[in-house]
Image: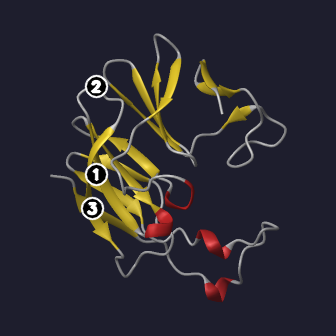
Amino acid sequence: MHCTLVGHRVRVARPCTSGCQANSYYCRPIHFTLSVPLLLLVGHRVRVARVDIPNKKVTNLTVPEGEKISRRESIDGLSYYKWSLVGVQPDMKTISRYYLNEKGDGIKEVKVLEKNHPMMDHPTTGVLVDNEFYYIANSQFEKISEEGVLSPMQQLYEPVILKVKID
């Protein structure tokens, strides 16, 4: 997939097959964050991409061997923190910190901050407040059928927001 920056959206050379608006050639990223200098980091189903805003160049971040951040292990809830990223891997029930390399074009190290918390049921997006990451622990995403029908109310439960220290 070739992407170019158009305003506040990412234009793709062909329609997306996942995570897109119907009848649209615009990819709806899972989550994105800005860092300095003028660098946009976009978490999407395939990888985490780096968008060099002045040059409008898009490249996928390199990842240490053995680390998985794509497809089933994709990252959601992406936040920028001190030349690193903090993100949620819903299917792996993991919150991790991804340290960027010096150039900002790759991840040099991954530190797991939280894994398999008992309240996790498809954890998802979060927000960084000071040095703590607050995230939705139980989005219950799987409780919505392929047809968009929500499970019966007796099978659902109250949303849970958890926090984890970054430093």
Residue wearing tag 1:
97
Query: Is there a contact, CB below 8 Å, between mark 1 and mark 3?
Result: no
Image quarter in which the N terminus is found: top right
Relative depth, front residue between 132 and 52: 52
Mark 2: amino acid:
Lys
Residue 144: % across, % down: 70, 71
Which badge, 3 or 2, is on the more N-terminal residue? 2
Mark 1: amino acid:
Arg
Identity of the residue drawn at 54% across and 81% down: 157
Disc sitting over residue 103 in the figure: 2
Mark 1–mark 2 Cα distance, whole angstroms, equals: 17 Å
Location of residue 67 with respect to 100 vertically, above or below: below
Which badge, 1 or 3, is on the more N-terminal residue? 1
Corner quadrant of residue 89: bottom left
Residue 77: % across, % down: 44, 51
Mark 1–mark 3 Cα distance, whole angstroms, equals: 6 Å
Disc sitting over residue 112 in the figure: 3
SS for dot 1: strand
Relative depth, front residue between 7 and 18: 18
Relative depth, front residue between 128 and 70: 70
